[in-house]
Amino acid sequence: MPKRELTEEEVALRIGLGAAIRVASGKKKLKPGDLAAAAGVALSQQYRIENGEVTADFLYLVKITRLLGMSLDELLHAALDEVPPALPAKDPVDATAQAGFSLHQSGSGNVQIGQQAGAIHNAGAIGFFKQQKGDKPNARKRSGKG
């Protein structure tokens, strides 16, 4: 079964947990090697957890919190404090309409986007496509092979 991609929130939570572990271990003057040994993981895995590259499992968290002298609840609350609050998701089309952005076709065939809409485009909310002269909208180019 292929792994699904993590959402931005899930990535932020993993990074927050890693940061909370680093902060708590730093206060106890513990090094990543100390945590790895206590949790029974490789040092490279410890670094990956602290950097938010992998998700820590429950047994790891129990062992780490015991070493850090804190409850699992305290560690998870510290992790949440490291994560910025999530912004409510908006439908990109609805957000564009609400802000009153205007899109218009220029004579050269390029879609022009207003300054504010350009900021949304840069955030990935609006697709921007350049139509070549003679292209049909949504037409695929053939490679000539096959």
Image (tube, grey):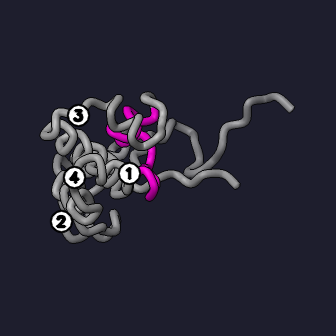
Q: Label 3 belongs to which residue?
A: 30
Question: Three-letter amino acid code at disc 2?
Answer: Ala
Which element type, helix, strand or loop, lies under badge 2? helix
* Residue 23 magenta-highlighted: no
Nearer mark to the viewer, of 2 and 1: 1
Q: Residue at x 24, y 43 (%)?
A: 19
Residue matched to label 2 = 99
The answer to whether the residue labelled 3 contacts the one labelled 1, judged by CB atoms less than 8 Å apart, is no
State the SS at label 1. Answer: helix
Q: Residue at x 29, y 53 (%)?
A: 65
Is residue 46 covered in magenta?
A: yes
Contact, mark 1 vs mark 4 (Cβ under 8 Å): no
Mark 3 and mark 1: Cα distance apart in space: 14 Å
Q: Which residue is mark 1?
A: 63
| Residue at image coords 58%, 51% | 138
Q: Is tag 1's residue or tag 4's residue first in the polypeptide sequence?
A: 1
Q: Secondary structure at mark 3?
A: loop
Query: Which stretch did the figure color magenta?
Result: 45-60
**Residue at the location (38% across, 51% down)?**
63
The mark found on residue 13 in the picture is: none
Nearer mark to the viewer, of 4 and 2: 4
Image spot of residue 110 (x, y percent): 38, 41
* Number of marks in picture: 4
Q: Amino acid at mark 1?
A: Lys
Question: In terms of image quadrants, where is residue 7?
Answer: bottom left
C-alpha span from label 2 to label 1: 50 Å
Amino acid type, mark 3: Leu
Give 95 or 74, whichever is nearer the viewer. Answer: 74
Q: Give me the C-alpha separation between circle 1 and circle 4.
A: 10 Å
Instruction: Identify the residue position indicated by label 4 in the image.
Output: 69
Q: In the figure, 19 relative to 78: above or below?
A: above
